[in-house]
Amino acid sequence: MREEQIAYLSSADHILERLLACGLKQKFTPAVLAAAAELLEPPASREWVMAEARQFFAARTGLIPHGLEELPARWVQQLPLNLAGREMGPFMITSLAFEQGVLCVAFAHEVGTKTGHMTIWDDLRFVLNLALFPNIWHPLTRQEEVTIWNRWPELRRELFTVRG
């Protein structure tokens, strides 16, 4: 498979296409998600959360994914919990990114499909994008909306832009 094809498989466009094809409806914009993720910082320090995640990836695969540090701390904290029960051999995660409101995941040994069907790599992207909170597929609580409304006035319009 060519590099461009591999890059597309881990892109936000591909992931959004897969999630929307399953009938999911986006509840709010990526900017609102970024604000919500900031609101919901884990109780532990970001440094501690990052150290725990690095240790998890190093122990399981020997590779710490590029971009881990750029993810919302809340997601970083949840990643090991959502990956712990999985065999990590085929899922050697090489990079992670937060783009267009989704978690983009690239794998070292990904193999595409000519039929366009979901692969095991797509399945893991799908599961992670629905499991990590907050995400654009699940509505915010009323309290979260009020807090974003008050803390980020520039996002007020976006709070009501995309609704499922």
Image: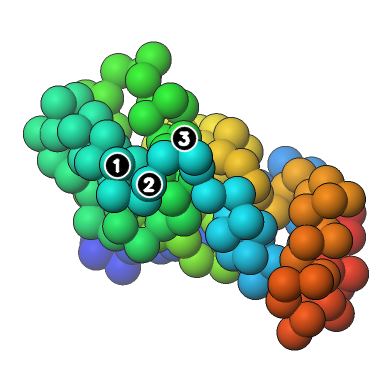
Residue at left 19%, top 33%? 55
Is residue 27 in view from this perspective? no
Quadrant of the rendered structure where residue 155 is?
Answer: bottom right
Determine whether 97 is above or below 135 in the image: below
Sequence-earlier tag: 3 or 2: 2
Question: How many discs mark residues in the rendered view?
Answer: 3
Quadrant of the rendered structure where residue 52 is?
Answer: top left
Determine whether 13 is above or below 130 in the image: below
Look at mark 3 in the image and give the residue it sits on: 78
Q: Where is residue 96 in the image (x, y as percent from the top left)?
A: 35, 53
The residues bearing labels 3 and 1 have C-alpha atoms spaced at a distance of 13 Å
User: Quarter holding the C terminus?
Assistant: bottom right
**Left or right of residue 83, residue 163 in this image:** right
Please, what is the three-letter code of the amino acid marked with disc 2? Ser
Frontmost residue, 156 versus 63: 156
The disc label shown at residue 45, or none:
2
Q: Is mark 2 on a helix, strand or loop?
A: loop
Please, what is the three-letter code of the amino acid marked with disc 1? Trp
Frontmost residue, 10 versus 164: 164
Look at mark 1 in the image and give the residue it sits on: 48
Q: Is mark 3 on a helix, strand or loop?
A: helix
Residue at left 76%, top 44%? 138
The residues bearing labels 3 and 2 have C-alpha atoms spaced at a distance of 14 Å
**Left or right of residue 37, residue 97 in this image:** left
Badge 3: how crowded within 10 Å, few (<14), some, or many (20+)? some
The residues bearing labels 2 and 1 have C-alpha atoms spaced at a distance of 5 Å
